[in-house]
Image: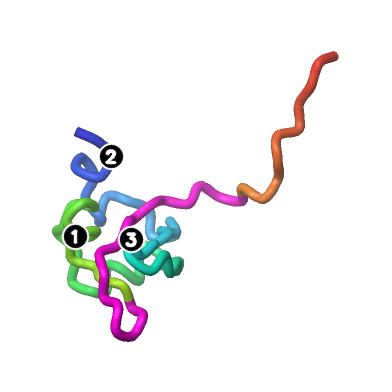
Amino acid sequence: MNWKTDLKLADIDAGTIFEITCRRCRLCRHETQAALMCDSFKDFYVDEVERALKCKKRLCSGPVRLAMNYGDMSEGFVGGMA
């Protein structure tokens, strides 16, 4: 079991951003939890949403991978030895 099978989409905060990447053409897009809830996925687990979504690129419509974004990750590791 993992987080995708344990969490329902409705259990996640409305401001959470999901990264949706096509497994076939590698097209990447970002959508919020609220935007995905509008697509009638209210009672779905995250893995079921992942299986139901398809790529939005014309003529591709391949399977997608769903990942959660955890805030601003643009800063690199800033550490070192004292």
Residue indicated by mark 2: 3
Please tell me the numbered disc located at residue 51: 1
Q: CA distance from mark 2 to mark 1?
A: 15 Å
In terms of secondary structure, where does tag 1 sit? helix
Q: CA distance from mark 2 to mark 3?
A: 20 Å
Q: Is residue 58 magenta?
A: yes
Q: Nearer the viewer, residue 56 or 43?
A: 56
Q: Residue at x 38, y 52 (%)?
A: 67
Closer to the eye: label 2 or 1: 1
Residue indicated by mark 3: 23
Relative image position of residue 29 (x, y in whole percent): 44, 69
Location of residue 56 with respect to 28 vertically, above or below: below
Neighbourhood count class around disc 1 (C-alpha, 10 Å): few under 14, some 14–19, many 20 upward:
few
Marks 2 and 3 in Cβ contact (< 8 Å): no
| Amino acid type at image mark 3 | Arg
Marks 3 and 1 in Cβ contact (< 8 Å): no
Q: Looking at the figure, which quarter contains the N terminus?
A: top left
Q: Which residues are magenta?
A: 56-72
Q: Quadrant of residue 9?
A: bottom left
| Amino acid type at image mark 1 | Arg
Q: Residue at x 30, y 68 (%)?
A: 36
Q: Nearer the viewer, residue 43 or 2?
A: 2
Neighbourhood count class around disc 3 (C-alpha, 10 Å): few under 14, some 14–19, many 20 upward:
some
Q: Quadrant of residue 14?
A: bottom left
Q: Earlier in the sequence, mark 2 or mark 1?
A: 2
